[in-house]
Amino acid sequence: MTAHSPRLLPEPRPLPGFRDVALFLDLDGTLAAIEPRPEDVGPQPWRTALMHRLEEKLDGRLAVISGRSLDEVDRILDGAVAAVAAVHGLVRRRADGSLEEAAPAEGLDLARSGLAALAARHPGLQIEDKRVSVAVHFRQAPELAGEVRRQAEALASDAGLRLQLGDMVAELCTPGLDKGAAVRAFMHEPPFVDSLPVFIGDDLTDEDGFRAARAFGGVSVLVGPLRATAADMRLEDVESVRGWLEASLMQDAQP
């Protein structure tokens, strides 16, 4: 699907009610501000309270779709959200608590050793192992972006893995699933069935989710700077997402 021009992305109005809506929310850059290191992001009382309120209003039609591991999502959100797709959809916890996880690809051992060698040469790089994927973060060494991408592309080709590029990160993933697949899976399960999906995210990894939401007749919202995207609307930053969600909750409470 052709990406929309950034000039055509209006700011979404608060939702008139949550009765027929399902919310799919990215975490980093959407519900939590980007920090220099992934582990610097921690739980916040306002965010935990907001997630609990959304779970209640949506009757469970709330899912967080993140590149982080499931343990990390639960740590940052204080376990406030039942339905979670982690590691870009490779690990998925349904609303009923049951777990679905892809089998790790055999090529991940090759990717781990290759990225470890790269990090040994460049101490500013940070390796994150998520069992079904392995990522290299270069936020603290942005000058290495080109080298990281070249090495990651070569490793992905040699190891038969899917390369997922994100905001200052390159991730080598077990092939087969992405955030769009996670949205589609949730939409075929209770309590999401027959709802209107709204996907909110900031990164290139969220584009699959944007397209999936639109395929189900829903809408998608880009968070952050203007860029070419499949999203329909845009919010400026994490605080704007928080304000929009809270405004929607308030509007829903009105008679």
Image (spheres, rainbow, N blue to C red):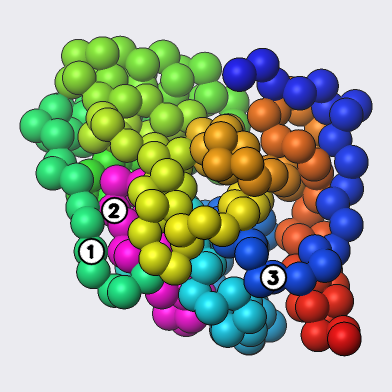
Q: Nearer the viewer, residue 161 or 248?
A: 248
Q: Nearer the viewer, residue 155 or 220?
A: 220
In the picture, the quarter occupied by the N terminus is top right
For residue 219, side relative to residue 108 (left or right): right
- The label on residue 18 is 3
**Residue drawn at point x = 89 percent, y = 41 percent:** 10
The region drawn magenta spans 75-94
| Residue 97, horizontal then vertical, whole percent | 29, 74
Is residue 76 shown in magenta?
yes
Question: How far apart are labels 1 and 2 at the CA level?
Answer: 7 Å
Question: How far apart are labels 3 and 2 at the CA level?
Answer: 27 Å
1 or 2: tag closer to the N-terminus: 2
For residue 4, side relative to residue 145 (left or right): right
For residue 26, side relative to residue 5 (left or right): left
Q: Is residue 158 above or below residue 29?
A: above
Instruction: Check whether the beta carbons of the residues at disc 3 and disc 1 lie within 8 A of each other.
Output: no
Q: Is residue 65 above or below residue 113?
A: below
Q: Is residue 15 above or below residue 255?
A: above
Mark 2 is on which residue type?
Val
**Residue drawn at point x = 82 percent, y = 21 percent:** 5
| Residue 145, horizontal then vertical, whole percent | 53, 24
**Residue drawn at point x = 14 percent, y = 28 percent:** 107
* Element carrying mark 1: strand
* Element carrying mark 2: strand
3 or 1: tag closer to the N-terminus: 3
Mark 3 is on which residue type?
Phe
Name the residue tied to disc 2: 91
Can you see residue 170? yes
Name the residue tied to disc 1: 99
* Element carrying mark 3: loop
